[in-house]
Structure formats: C-alpha cells, structure tokens
Image (cartoon, rainbow, N blue to C red):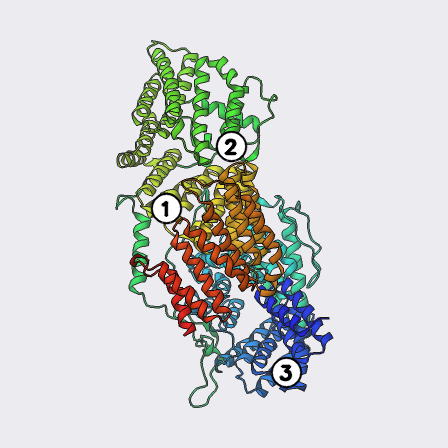
C-alpha cells in the first residue's frame, strides 16, 4: 500500500525533475495516492504542487481543477493551510483568472465572476489591489476592452506592490502588452527599458520582454536594438514550447524586416508547438506570426515551394486539420490566415466586440519595414552582427501612487500619454536617456569600424558583383563549365556558381550518360563539386576514373593535372581529418615538384613556338591552370620559392595566349596568387600588402579577387590575434558569397567568420553565424561540412553554458563520425554529450551515452582497454547521480555491475613507464567510493577510500590521494564519527604538508570539515 512517505518522496522527486508533462503526470498520480490515503495535508500539498506544475509546464488550463479544489478547502477550512500555502494560493488565483480570459470557451460572465472572486479573496486577506488591477487590465485586453484596460492599468500603477505581485521584471509586461496592442510604440519601449538594459530580470526575463518589444523597437526607429533583442531572446526561448507566444513575436519581427529565410527556418522548426499551445490566445498569436512569415515568403516568389514539414493536427483550442509537408507555402498561408480569422471570431463572439479581429487584421496587413537589419540588400542577404544599439528612452514609471491630496491619478498621464489641444490623447515620446561616456565611446568605435580598414586606410573599392544567371539543368552546367575551362584562371564568380549549383542540386547525369564528347569535362565538374562538399575521397576517385580520358586528349599533361588536383585533395583531407602530415610531407613535396617540373618544361616548349595552333593554346591554358593548382599544393607544403616559381611560369604561359583566354586581368590573378603564397608561407606582412594593393587597383574590384583577398586578410589577422579585423574581413567575404547565391562557398565563409567571433569571445554571434552556415550545409546535404560545424557549435555551446546545444551538436557530430568510421573521435563527442546530459540532470541519458562511448573503444590495444574501463566508470557514476537518494539507491546494483565490467576491461593491462596498474585500480576504488557515498552506503565506501589512497600513493600521486582522504573525512563526518573524521583530516594535512601545497582544495575542504566538527 502507498504510504505517506511514498507520496512525499514522489513530490520531492517531481520538484527536482523540473516542469513539463512528465512531471505533471507524476504529481497527478501522487494526488490520487493522497486521496486514497485520506491524508488531508497531503491532499492539499499535492494539489498545490499539481497546480504549479500545470501552470509552469505549459498546461495551464488543467490547473483550474486542482486550484478550485484547494480554494474550496481553504474557504471551508482556512486553518488547514499554513502561511506559505496561502501565499501560493494567492498566486494560483491570479493565474486562474488569466487562463479563463485567454480562452473564448469561458464565457464573459464567468470571467467577470472570477475577477470579482479574486478581488474578494485578496481583500479578505488584506492584500494590495495591485495584482487585482493588473489581472483586470490583462483580461480586459483579452475581452477587447482597451479603454477598460487603460483604466485598470492606471489603478494598477496607483497601488503598491506586495509579495503577491509579479517580479519587477515581469510586472511591467502588462503595460508593454497594452502599448503593443494599441501601437503606442514609444511607451512600450520606455516601459521595457529596465528589462532591456538588464537593470531587472528573473528566470524568464529579459527574454520574454525582449520578444514582446521587438515590434515596438522596430517601429520606433531602433532596428539595431531590435536585432540584438531578437538574437538574445530567441536563443533563450527556442527550446521551450511554453514560449510559443514569445516565438510569435519573433516570427512577426522576422517577416517585417524581410528575413524570410530565417523566418521560414524558425517556423518549420517550431510548427509542432502549435499542438501544444497553452491557450487559444497563444494559438492565435502563433498563427498570426506564422502567417506573416508565409506572406513574405509568397511575396518573395516562393509560394509554390513546399513547406517541407507537416502542420500538426490539433483540436484543443481550435480544430486544426493539419497539412502535409508537400503543401505549398501559398496554400499554408491561406489556410493559416483562415484559421486565425475564425479563431479571432470566437473571441469576438465571446467578447461582444470585434477588437481581437481588428488587431489581427491590422497585424496581417502591416507593411514590411525598409532597410532593417537582415533585410535583403540588392543582390543578397548581409551577415548582421551586433552593433551598438540606438538610444533608449528614459524608463516609463510603473509604480505611481495616489496623489498626496488624495485625488485619483489621471488615466492618460499614468500611461505616459498627454492630451492635445483638442483633448485627444496622443502618444508622448519620453525623453531619451542622456548619452553616457561609454555609449558615446561605443558609437565612435562603431563609426570607425564602418569606415576604416587596416589601421585607418581608406575603404576598399566597391565589389563589381553581378549575380550569375541561374543554371537550368545539368547540360547547361557542363557547357558553362567547359567555357570556363577555356581560360587561364578559370575560377571566376560564374565558375564558382556553376560548381556550387552542381554540388547543392545534384544536376549531373549518371556516369555513363554524359553528353557525348564531354565525358571528362563532366567528371572534372563532378569532382570539383565533391571537393566543394569536402568529399575528398570521392573526388579523388572520380578524377582517377576519367584520368585516361583527359590523358587521351592532352597526353601526359592531362594526367599531371589530375594528379595535382588529387594531391591537393589528399592534403585537404588530412587536414579535415586532423591527421599529421609530417611523415608524408617530403614524399608529397617530391611528387609535386616532379609533376610541376614536367609541366613547366612543356610550357617552355610551347611558348618558344612562334605560332601556336588552337590545340597548343588549349594545352597552354590547361598547363597554366595545372601550375596554379601546383602552386596551391606547394603553398600547403610551405615550399614558398617553388610555389612562386610555378606562378612565374604561369605568367609566361599567359603571355603566349590571347587575352580572351584569360579569365580576368592576369596581373591581378597572379599577384593575388603570389599574395596567398607569401601569407601562407610565413611572410604575412608582404602577403597582406600585396593582396590589398591588388584589391585597390581598380574603381571596382572583381568579386573573386575581393573574396580571395578578404579571406587572405582574415586568415592573416587570425594568425596575429587581430580578431576584430578578421571578423570584418570574413564578414565581407561571406556577404559576397551570399549576394551571389553561392551556397557552399558562403558556408565556408560563415564558418571562418564564426570561428573568428568565437576567438573574440563573441559567442552569441558566433553561434548564430555557425547555425546559419549549418542550415545551409544541411539543406545542401553536405555532411562533412555539417560535421565540422556541429563540432564548432558544440564548442561554442560549452563556452556559453548552453548544455542543450552541447548535447545536440555533440550527438550529431558523433553520428557523422561513426558513419565515417572515426570511432575514437566519435567516442569523444559522445562523452561531451554525456557530460551535457549530466549537467542537465538527465543522469540516465548521461550513463547511456558514456556506455556508448565505451563501446566505441578499440579493445585490441591497451589504451583502448583503459579508455573503455574509464568510460564505463563514468557511466556508473552518472547512473546513480540521480535527483533523489531513493532513486540513486534503486540503481546501485546496476552501477556495481558496470563497475565490475570496467575493472575487467583493464585487468590485463601491464605496467609501463607511463602507466601504473596500482594507480588505475586505486582510481577505480575512488569512483566506487563516490558511488557508494552517493547512494548512502557510507560504511561500505570507507574501505574503498583506503584502497584508493593506497593505489594513488603507489606513484606518489599526493593530489589524487588527498581526494580519497577527503572523501574518507566526509564519510565519517556524515556518520557522526567525529574522531575518525578529524583523523582523516589530519592525514590530509600530513600528506600535503610541504609549502608548495598551500592553498590546495583538499586543505580548504578539511578546514571546513574541522570547523563543522568543533
């Protein structure tokens, strides 16, 4: 039979678990147990907990039943409730009123009855009317009575706050919401200022207010502040379905600033939340925000594009029939706006007015804003980073009191409004805050950043960018590629675009179905696309397949060209896989110089010919491009002189062919290549000088030279720690690629930018940039690039303390690494994910992930057996690191089994110079002691502490040995064994008695134990 202790344990576990449907279900079961037991105290406590769980767990409507039960009990038996429970009841009552108002199925009369009961309850308890007026103001808005809302807000501000009021960060949201609905933008911003500036906050602030203030910030002429609020708040809300209403404001904002891609991505990510809306009003808000994004997507010409994800079916607040993933954006837009309008009509019917529908129509018809951050600029979307925000107004007051003469305050003045000469209420723009020295400094720095480069030089020339024409099909892609192959330095913007289109759209015909006569060209293009996707092994194999064909056309030169391209891919593949190249460098250098020498000899023969025939010109063009590839290979191998020599031979070849066979001006192409050689081979200063000089030669710089130059300057700036300069360069490089619509090149640029931002500790911006790159890479199916991005994002998540992100990206990285056969590195990322799960208090998941990491170890080696044993020990520790002691104890037997498996894993590993089996078994005992302590088995843990100490001291590892003795002291102290605990403390002091141990953590710990035992 369930006992009182069982119920208390269940409530304690649920409290530690955090809010959500799982927690609510556990507490609901505890309520049924308490009812069956007939324990009145537990029946009250369990229902208070259930009401709280429903309210905080996105199921607020379910909270009404347990709340009404408790309210009835309190009214009949107030003595059954202690003071803390009465205060909780106050909070639950105000929430109940809000829940009723947000759902049109609750009649207006019923809502009014709840309001009256709330006032009666608060007055009877001697509470301030501040909460009552605040709830009435919010409910009046839901009833479509904005004048009443204004009056109640005035009264709310005229009454003092007490312990029943929302915190200082949340309370002003009532006025921000009113100003949002009535489009009093300046008032909304002024009211939100204390939260926006970080002066006040709580666990749901500032992100909730930042979300609500997005449109007011934008409409009041503060686009930079709005962009920052969007970035910061979306990261905080994006994993909580309870934040659906906040998400709706983000979607509205993104639609109105033209960020269609980002808006669609976020919409698709969160569509399942529609079925979890906690009220009809939240659902209406979400439908409105999503409709605006779909409207802008349709206007951008994407109406016939499939939405790509299912619209969930739901019927809790309104019958949403659901839509297939194949449904077009235009149809989803039409359906969603229809749902929103019909749901708004339900509010109108309940309210007896059309205010809710009127607000919806104004929102759906609102025009997009011009020149907002992230909007489409000319040919593409720019990368927007955080910049100093516009000035905010002085905070609007939210705590006025009755005038000293006893007169009630004027409603309009309390709302920050003033009447004009005709008595009409106009919005008053509060004064802006005075410019602080810090703010002035930030603006000045921003100005310099926008207009300067490299220590104050003039800005670079504009980029002469014309977006390449679309590629209709595979045949067109091949023919355009062939045209580019006719010129030296064929890497033009259109060349990059064609390769990128093939890489992202899989345009080419299957092998064996190529255009007759263009077989090897198709193979080279396919290999170039694979290289773009960082699929180096596949690219190498494809070139080897067509090597005989190009050799047939050009003789040995064709084979040399293929071999150099493949050598370049080999080096890149090793770099991506983080393999050391030291052992193969000399051999690769010999291969490269041999191939290049033979090509150079052929060039010399051709250029000495008085009159080249067309075949000779084609051969020279191929030879020149092969030498440019060779120069890149030599640069990777740090053979500067040889690389520069190869470029010089390219110049001789270029002089011998007509200018119409040059992709661009050859002096520009070759000097940029020289700059890259210099910078990457250690002569950073001269390399950067030359790159800058090339970029400044013309009134408008070609996009290819601009992108290459920006990349070079960015990499060089990173090498010397000039991260701000690197950020500026990589940002411009990314802007060029985004404007041209060259997806995977844009991904590479964004990856560089994200890395620079992380190095500069601008983690929020880094995460946003890298996530944008990841989205592009995933849409293109580029798994290898996605892997690198997942790894970077896991690292950034660690820096930001975003454990969910660490777990998500580490698991994705581990999956891809396993698919690639890189088991050891996959195990590392599984361990990262396990640690994140542990930090999120999900110990069972953490234990499972550590087990998966252990299973990836190569037990054919001693190191693999050791690593497997250590991962298993971490799994066992995680398993018992549960939220409550009873839950931990329930898993002790399983943990013991895992620990025994861990010991067997390294049992046969022999001692070496760097490894002690005695130390390893001591470390095992240390973990076992911790597991037993965590499960309340202190006495059993004592001997394991002694064994751990002995093992550590086998190698004179006093640091680890002190940890074992500290645990011993803890165990005795918790058992009330004062003398033994003090003896263990004395052993620590003796162990760490030398002066160099002063300040050690173990000494500080035993000092605290000794203080406690005195």
User: What number is the disc on residue 300?
Assistant: none
| Residue at the spot of label 3 | 117
Compared to residue 760, the image places residue 63 above or below, namely below
The x and y percentages for residue 846 are 56, 53
Q: CA distance from mark 3 to mark 1?
A: 59 Å
Q: Earlier in the sequence, mark 3 or mark 2?
A: 3
In the foreground, 312 or 889: 889
Q: Nearer the viewer, mark 3 or mark 2?
A: 2
Compared to residue 299, the image places residue 399 above or below, namely below
Q: CA distance from mark 3 to mark 2?
A: 68 Å
| Residue at the spot of label 1 | 727
Q: CA distance from mark 1 to mark 2?
A: 27 Å
User: What number is the disc on residue 535?
Assistant: 2
Q: Earlier in the sequence, mark 3 or mark 1?
A: 3
The x and y percentages for residue 494 are 46, 31
The x and y percentages for residue 374 are 46, 50
Q: Is residue 321 left or right of residue 963?
A: right
Residue at the image point whose x is 61% and y is 22% from the top: 513
In the foreground, 303 or 2: 2
């Amino acid at each position: 039979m369930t006992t009182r202790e069982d119920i208390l344990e269940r409530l304690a576990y649920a409290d530690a678990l955090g809010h959500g449907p799982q927690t609510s279900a556990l507490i609901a079961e505890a309520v049924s147990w308490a009812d069956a037991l007939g324990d009145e105290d537990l029946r009250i406590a369990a229902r208070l907990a259930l009401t709280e769980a429903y309210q905080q767990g996105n199921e607020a409507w379910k909270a009404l039943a347990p709340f009404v039960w408790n309210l009835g009990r309190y009214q009949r038996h107030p003595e059954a409730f202690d003071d803390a429970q009465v205060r909780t009841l106050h909070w639950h009552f105000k929430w109940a009123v809000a829940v009723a108002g947000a759902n049109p199925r609750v009649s207006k009369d019923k809502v009014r009855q709840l309001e009256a009961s709330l006032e009666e309850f608060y007055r009877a308890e001697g509470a301030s009317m501040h909460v009552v007026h605040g709830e009435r103001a919010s409910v009046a808005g839901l009833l479509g009575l904005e004048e009443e809302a204004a009056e109640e807000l005035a009264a709310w501000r005229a009454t003092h706050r007490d312990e029943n009021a929302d915190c200082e960060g949340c309370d002003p949201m009532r006025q921000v919401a009113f100003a949002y609905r009535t489009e009093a933008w300046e008032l909304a911003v002024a009211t939100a200022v204390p939260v926006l500036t970080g002066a006040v906050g709580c666990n749901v602030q500032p992100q909730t207010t930042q979300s609500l203030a997005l449109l007011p910030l934008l409409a009041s002429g503060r686009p930079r502040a709005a962009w920052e609020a969007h970035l910061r708040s979306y990261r905080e809300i994006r994993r909580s379905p309870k934040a659906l209403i906040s998400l709706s404001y983000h979607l509205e904002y993104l639609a109105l600033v033209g960020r269609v891609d980002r808006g669609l991505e976020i919409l698709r990510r969160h569509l399942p939340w529609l079925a979890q809306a906690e009220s009809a009003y939240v659902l209406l808000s979400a439908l409105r925000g999503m409709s605006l994004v779909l409207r802008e997507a349709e206007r951008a010409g994407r109406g016939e594009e499939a939405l790509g994800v299912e619209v969930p079916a739901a019927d809790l607040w309104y019958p949403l029939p659901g839509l297939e993933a194949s449904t077009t954006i235009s149809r989803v837009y039409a359906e969603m706006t229809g749902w929103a309008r019909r749901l708004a009509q339900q509010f109108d019917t309940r309210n007896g007015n059309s205010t809710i529908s009127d607000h919806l129509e104004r929102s759906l018809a609102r025009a997009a804003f011009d020149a907002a951050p992230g909007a489409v600029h000319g040919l593409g979307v720019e990368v927007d980073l955080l910049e100093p925000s516009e000035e905010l107004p002085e905070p609007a007051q939210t705590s006025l009191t009755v005038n000293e003469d006893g007169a009630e305050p004027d409603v309009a003045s309390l709302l920050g409004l003033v009447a004009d000469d005709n008595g009409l209420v106009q919005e008053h723009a509060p004064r802006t805050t005075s410019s602080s020295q810090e703010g002035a400094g930030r603006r000045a720095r921003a100005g310099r950043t926008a207009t300067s480069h490299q220590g104050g030089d003039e800005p670079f020339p504009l980029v002469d960018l014309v977006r390449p024409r679309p590629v209709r099909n595979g045949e067109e892609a091949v023919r355009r590629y062939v045209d580019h192959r006719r010129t030296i330095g064929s890497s033009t913007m259109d060349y990059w675009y064609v390769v990128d289109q093939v890489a992202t759209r899989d345009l080419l015909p299957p092998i064996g179905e190529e255009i007759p006569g263009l077989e090897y060209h198709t193979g080279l293009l396919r290999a170039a696309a694979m290289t773009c996707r960082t699929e180096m092994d596949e690219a190498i194999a494809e070139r080897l397949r067509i090597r005989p064909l190009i050799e047939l056309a050009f003789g040995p030169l064709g084979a040399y060209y293929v071999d150099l391209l493949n050598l370049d891919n080999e080096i890149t593949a090793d770099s991506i896989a983080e393999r050391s190249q030291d052992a193969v460098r000399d051999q690769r250098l010999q291969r490269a110089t041999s191939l290049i020498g033979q090509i150079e000899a052929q060039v010399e023969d051709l250029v000495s010919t008085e009159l080249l025939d067309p075949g000779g010109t084609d051969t020279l063009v191929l030879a020149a491009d092969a030498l440019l590839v060779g120069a890149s290979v030599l640069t990777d191998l740090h053979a500067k002189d040889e690389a520069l020599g190869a470029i010089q031979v390219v110049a001789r070849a270029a002089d011998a062919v007509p200018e119409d066979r040059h992709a661009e001006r050859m002096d520009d192409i070759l000097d940029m290549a020289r700059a890259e050689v210099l910078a990457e081979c250690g002569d950073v200063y001269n390399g950067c000088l030359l790159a800058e000089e090339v970029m400044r030669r013309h009134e408008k710089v070609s996009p290819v030279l601009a992108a290459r130059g920006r990349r070079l300057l960015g990499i060089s700036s990173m090498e010397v720690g000039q991260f701000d300069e690197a950020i500026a360069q990589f940002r411009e490089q990314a802007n060029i690629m985004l404007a041209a619509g060259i997806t995977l090149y844009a991904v590479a640029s964004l990856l560089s930018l994200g890395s620079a931002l992380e190095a500069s500790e601008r983690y929020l911006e880094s995460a946003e940039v890298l996530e944008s790159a990841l989205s592009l890479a995933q849409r293109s199916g580029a798994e290898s690039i996605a892997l690198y991005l997942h790894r970077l994002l896991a690292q950034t998540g660690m820096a930001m303390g975003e454990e969910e992100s660490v777990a998500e990206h580490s698991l994705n990285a581990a999956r891809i690494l396993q698919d690639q056969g890189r088991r050891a590195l996959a195990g590392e990322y599984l361990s990262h994910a396990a640690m994140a799960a542990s930090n999120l208090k999900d110990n069972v998941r953490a234990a499972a992930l550590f087990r998966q990491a252990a299973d990836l170890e190569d037990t054919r080696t001693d190191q693999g057996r050791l690593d497997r044993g250590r991962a298993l020990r971490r799994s066992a520790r995680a398993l018992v690191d549960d939220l409550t002691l009873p839950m931990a104890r329930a898993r002790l037997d399983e943990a013991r089994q895992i620990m025994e498996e861990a010991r067997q894993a390294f049992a046969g590993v022999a001692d070496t110079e760097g490894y002690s089996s005695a130390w390893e078994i001591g470390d095992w005992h240390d973990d076992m002691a911790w597991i037993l302590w965590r499960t309340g088995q202190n006495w059993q843990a004592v001997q394991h502490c002694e064994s751990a100490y002995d093992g550590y001291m086998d190698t004179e590892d006093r640091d680890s040995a002190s940890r074992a003795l500290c645990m011993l002291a803890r165990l005795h102290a918790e058992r009330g064994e004062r003398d033994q605990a003090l003896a263990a403390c004395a052993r620590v002091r003796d162990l760490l008695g030398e002066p160099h141990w002063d300040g050690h953590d173990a000494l500080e710990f035993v000092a605290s134990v000794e203080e406690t035992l005195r």
